[in-house]
Image (cartoon, rainbow, N blue to C red):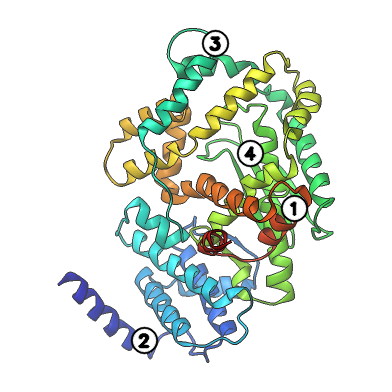
Amino acid sequence: MKIILNILIIIFLLNSCAEDKIINIKYTTNTLADRFVFLALSLGEHDKDYVDAYFGEDSVRAEAKKLKLPLRRIKIEAIKLLAVLDSIKVENDEFNRKKFLFATIRAMNSRINHLLGYDYLFDQEAKFIYNANPPHYSDEHFDNILEKLNKLLPGKGDILSRYEKFRKNFIIPEDKVDTVFRRTIAESRKRTKEKLDIPKNENFTLEYVTGKSWSGYNWYGGNAQSLIQINLDQPTYIDRAIDIAAHEGYPGHHTFHSRIEAEYAKNRNWAEFTVYPLFSPMSLLSEGLANFGIEVVFPGDEKILFEKNILFPLAGISSSDVDKYYEIQSLVSKLNFSRNEVARNFLDGNISEEDAIKYSMKYSLMSESRAKQSLSFVKKYRAYVINYNYGLDLVRKYVARHAGDDSDKVWEIYTELISNPHLPSDLILTSENK
């Protein structure tokens, strides 16, 4: 009965928009994209996390600020756009522009539903917003990994304490952090530019912050310019330098956004690519590509060699026990999907905040403070956590299926993915059909 009532209300509202403040337009893909951008910016007036980047016309943003449409009105307009998109035919729809726009607006509608008080289950949100069906892992799966770590870690006592004690020797001293990161970003940038084109004017500003729920963030400002922030709330371990430099910069987010902007926002003048909604299918591939970019720019043992030969001396860290450190870190990386499980169970109401922190300490090997920080991320960004691990898994499998071990082919496939809009479901279907 409630569903029927909601449908009747929506029909009534759709039919009552004749005197709205938004100018009526003739529907083409371009004008639909223009309206989507306006609605995205309007939603950003209610949800400060929704618009991660915007580099379109200032007048559009000013109009969104001026009108400040109510959430329910934005929802109605989004539903109208979906209906029109579904009805129109687009000839020669290169890169599935219509399908991509439809999925992004559907994700917008789901985000609005959340803001209006309807909390999806974790898997529902992953599907409706990120176009994904993340896998489930049992505690037994992680217990098996922990057992291997138990045998490998030196000392006695619980695994977390031994792990924290062992890796203390690999923390970058605070006065060396900037030197290490700038050297690492420079190397990632050099290697990336040897393999793909980046706008000549591209650049970034590096900034250190505290009080955030994330470890690093790329704020893309348009015109191939970024602000890369690194959070110093938690100790910075030596192996995180390349991870953050490649993920946030080269060939990760900064490279991704600058190439998409150059080709689609500027060359093609597709308005939908002047705004990046964080809660959208693009985020799964953006995060997955950024994480896989670490492996692409430092393939095989090159990451370890660069850290041993360059970063360890810069940081003043001894390289003793380094081989065991990498062996341990390789096993710890297999616990990444535990973040999804704690987020799923917490957001679905199956565990308390206290239990969520304990779960992260046990299965993600996080200190209590890091576990609390991780949970604050889940509270703020919800199912977004799947984009890091499942996104990486999806991209890695796709590239492996199409490129194998051919390093040049890996760069070729990666460059295509990072330069064009795709939906996660496209990669799954394509890889399964090959």
Identify residue for label 2. Answer: 17
Question: Left of 275 or right of it: where is 374?
Answer: left
Q: Which residue is mark 4?
A: 230
* Mark sitting earlier along the chain (1/3): 3
At numbered mark 2, what does the secondary structure look like: helix, strand or loop?
loop
Q: Residue at x 36, y 44 (%)?
A: 344
Alpha carbons under labels 1 and 4: distance apart: 27 Å
Residue lying farthest to the left in this orientation:
1
Q: Amino acid at mark 4?
A: Ile
C-alpha separation, residue under disc 2 versus residue under disc 4: 45 Å
Q: Find disc 1 in the rendering and name its residue.
A: 411
Q: Amino acid at mark 2?
A: Cys
Q: Residue at 75% of width from left, 54% of height from top?
A: 409
Give residue 122's mark.
Answer: none
Residue 358: x %, y % from top left: 36, 27
Dot 4 or dot 3, earlier in sequence: 3
Residue type at numbered disc 3: Pro
Camera-side residue of 415 and 210: 415
- According to the picture, the residue beneath numbered tag 3 turns out to be 154
Q: Are marks 1 and 2 in contact (CB under 8 Å)?
A: no
What kind of element bears circle 1? helix
Name the amino acid, label 1.
Trp
**Quarter holding residue 5:** bottom left
Residue shown at the point (81%, 52%) measured from the top left: 195
Give how far apart the Cα atoms at labels 1 and 2 are.
49 Å
- In the depicted structure, whether residue 39 falls above or below residue 358: below
